[in-house]
Amino acid sequence: RDDNNGSNSGSARVFSGVDGSVLYTFNGDSANDYFGYSVSDAGDINGDGYADLIVGAYGDDNNGSYSGSARVFSGVDGSVLYTFNGDSASEYFGYSVSGAGDVNADGYTDLIVGACYDDNNGSNSGSARVFSGVDGSVLYTFNGDSTYDNFGSSVSGAGDVNGDGYADLIVGAYRDDNNGSDSGSARVLSGIDGSVLTTINGDSSGENFGYSVSGAGDIDGDGLGDFIIGARYDDNNGSNSGSARVFLSSDLMNDFDLDFIVNSADPDDDNDGTPDVNDAFPFDASESVDTDSDGIGNNADLDDDNDGTPDVSDAFPLDASETTDTDSDGIGNNADLDDDNDGFPDTDEVDCGSDPLDAGSVCNTTPSTGESDFDGDLDDDILLRSTSTSSWRLFSLASGAVAGNTGYAAYANSGWVHVANLDADGDLDKDVLLRNTSTGAWRLFTTQSGAVTGSSALNLFTSSNYSFVAALDVDADGDEDILLRNSSDGKWKLFTIEAGAVTGSSPFNLWASSDYTLAATGDFDGDMDDDVLLRGTDGKYRLFTVEAGDTTSFAGIGEIYASSDYTPQVASDFDGDGDDDLIIRSTSNGNWRLYSFQNNAVLGSAAIYPYQSTDYTFQTEGDFDGDGDSDLLLRNSAGTWKLFTIQSGAVTGNSPAGIYSSTDWQIQR
């Protein structure tokens, strides 16, 4: 607290080792600089053959009150070589200073300065900065871990701790709380890259371990720099009696892979590229994984997952639950819903008697994916009709994009309205059903490879009392059937279809009350017979299970929102499990919700995220990218189309659909 240049300006004096005479006196610049609070030999900074000096002044105000500074003086003539300043107020930069040794192996000694009240990682977390002796540039900045660590309260060169030829560093944080409040710590840092070589913690609360640190030279003659750490409030010989501990680098710096990072600090001791925390054999570079925990690493183990199938014959040698992948799609047969990738879920193939492991053995039915596959490529297509001319246009899709479009030769007469797309002849290509608005007559246009191959009358009730409700396969024969409803009494009539012709009709056992209307049809239990979901005026849903052409049971589905604000949009298989699911949408805010079904019960529900804007309305669903999960097609009032791809019940992307945008063209589904 020398007052040579004002109260507490401070000073530092250099004395001759020969006779004790004063060689230099250095003074602080102004009051309360506290120049000289820390001093150290700096080594030969400028390579002139003379040792230089460094002095800290933590109260210097160059960059704000108590920002602090450190000044380096020439040993030859006492001139100032460098002045380093703290960055901002109250850092206390210069609270500790030291020569650092030759950190970067450029032949010049470097410097380290602590700022124990720096706030980089919280109030008073502290920092330490390493400066080049050559040009004064910052080589490293080290920060304390958390609030009130006071990291940088002590700093020192540590010598070459790990034997890599570079001088290393040690920094104390006497208020670190790793082993209790103010237990303290000291960190040894690599000169070559600034990485942490080791962190040593005080034993208990209040020790202030790390209040002082220093390199100790090579105490045990092993060629490695050792170091000493003080704990001023240690209570070993009474309250605050204090202690100092000497650490030998040879004890701390075991280095299995000779990468100059000690094992205690090395995240990969055997340098095999696998972090030790994930390495079953951290000291064996030839092994890192032991899938079955048998003590034999996977590289040497002949059956890594211990499932009884040798790795050479196992498609999934690291998965004990899988051994075979028939279609080589990366999904094992136990988890794969379509083992042979023929477009038919395994459960459907078992039901219909075909082989789920043979792509050439298929059910005589359409895969339960989308709405309108007219060309049999398993990617659904889009059928439009002009409201002004009644002409038709078929847009073929492949891998989620329009592959082409062509005319579709159904009646271009406004007296014939589109009723449904259905596979009435079991050839896997959707056909088109029309109805005459004046006579009630029905006409089926059969399709193959995207083109009309013929048309014929379909012998359904022509009375205007009977309206079309749904096309659904109730008998698992691969030909979709037709469900009508009488508007006068609410009763339902099922017409079975085979090879494009009506083969019979019968009452269909659904509730006739006008309180109940159709919400959706779909195969909700994966048995290849489509089921029927009704909704009451109370908003609640009832699911009727269908087997062999008739309903067999019904159950309330209480999990689906009953609010009238939410309306059903479509049922289809959106998660690829072979059971159809249900999407509903809010009419007020446009939110969407997907209900996943398995075995005619709701397995779970989740929000999905196509556009919420109510300007975009649902047009159709279909498996437009051929991945087995149905996708969604939306359109806004301006005619713009947007295709949303779905996988595993979640939207995975969206893209424009290259379809006529004129609103004269409307979708037919």
Image: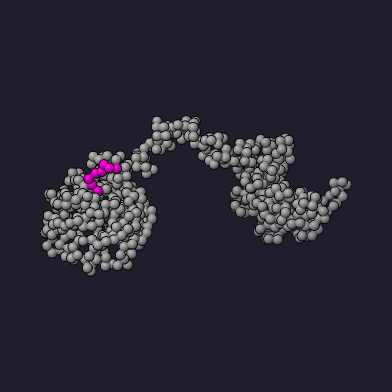
Point out residue 71 in the picture as x, y percentages from the top left corner: 75, 55
Tell which of 376 and 650 is nearer to you.
376
Q: Quadrant of the N terminus?
A: bottom right
Residue at image x 47%, y 32%? Answer: 301
Tell which of 329 and 666 is nearer to you.
329
Tell me if residue 464 is in the magenta stretch.
no
Image quarter of residue 179: top right
Point out residue 346 in the picture as x, y percentages from the top left corner: 29, 42
Point out residue 491 in the picture as x, y percentages from the top left corner: 14, 53
Tell me if residue 362 is in the magenta stretch.
yes
Please say whether residue 201 is visible from this viewpoint.
Answer: no
Point out residue 208 in the picture as x, y percentages from the top left corner: 67, 43
Q: Quadrant of the C terminus?
A: bottom left
Residue at image x 35%, y 62%? Answer: 613
Specify the farthest residue to the bottom.
388
Q: Is residue 527 left or right of residue 48?
A: left
Q: Is residue 131 left or right of residue 266?
A: right
Q: How is the image coloured?
A: one colour
Image quarter of residue 3: bottom right
Q: Is residue 655 left or right of residue 284?
A: left
Tell which of 345 and 454 is nearer to you.
454
Residue at image x 63%, y 38%? Answer: 258
Q: Which residues are magenta?
A: 359-366
